[in-house]
Image (tube, helix red, strand yellow):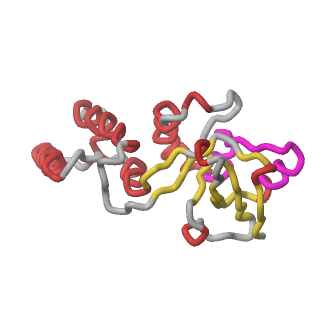
Amino acid sequence: MDKITVWTKQNRAVLKELEEKGRYVAKKEYIFKDLGEHAHLVLEVYDWLVRNTPNAAQKPKDAEYPVWVSLAKEATMLQSDDSVILELTLDPALITMVNIGKWGTMLNYSYIPADEKDAKRHQQQLQLYGVSDTKAYMSQFYPQIKREILNSWSRLFDDSILLDGHGCYGNLWEVKSRWITNVIQ
């Protein structure tokens, strides 16, 4: 079976956990530790991802969130003093591909259009109400627009729908120490 090499930026504590336990899974507490007061802003979108990802059946019981991996070394987030870059070689079937343009749209609480015509229709609807996607999503006053935004997110995994930023990243449910082929410190 062919393997794929991917890279992930992680806190040094993750490397220590991998060395001690042989395995790492992302937990909500780690996200709060990393993002602090801003964690709640992204967790709603991450919760959607966890519930709707195509490989949800592979999720170990103790994994709360996916681990992001880059398919190209140069596309990996820049290293910082408290982080390491882990190079992993593993079975590609363990990775769920995520279009980064669509993911960014979701993190902005925005609508993923089916095509240009749908994008225009949605923008006209927002103009009619005098609201943005983010405002409609965050407010209790536009439930139909929020529902439309949430429903559009199912297009995240539809490869026939493209947005700017065609690059993909991947998600894993866990990282195993035996997959590590290099650690960049």
* Residue 25 falls inside the magenta stretch: yes
**Which image quarter is the C terminus in?**
bottom right
Q: Give left or right: position of 48 versus 114.
A: right
What residue appears at the point 46 percent right and 35 percent down from the top-left corner?
48
Which is nearer the eye, 44 or 174? 174
Q: Residue furthest front?
A: 1
Determine the image quadrant of residue 162.
bottom left
Q: Main secondary structure of the magenta part?
A: helix
Q: Is residue 30 visible?
A: yes
Q: Is residue 130 visible?
A: no
Q: Give left or right: position of 138 versus 116.
A: right
Residue 80 is situated, as x and y percent measured from the top left of the image, at: 69, 70
What residue appears at the point 68 percent right and 27 percent down from the top-left corner?
61
Magenta residues, start to end: 14-35
Which is nearer the eye, 116 or 135? 116
Which is nearer the eye, 185 or 93? 93
Residue 13 is situated, as x and y percent measured from the top left of the image, at: 80, 54
* Residue 173 falls inside the magenta stretch: no
Residue 181 is situated, as x and y percent measured from the top left of the image, at: 77, 61
What residue appears at the point 80 percent right and 55 percent down from the top-left corner?
15
Picture mark count: 0
Residue 109 in the image: above or below residue 10: above
Q: Residue furthest right?
A: 20
What residue appears at the point 79 percent right and 43 percent down from the top-left corner?
23
Residue 26 is situated, as x and y percent measured from the top left of the image, at: 67, 42
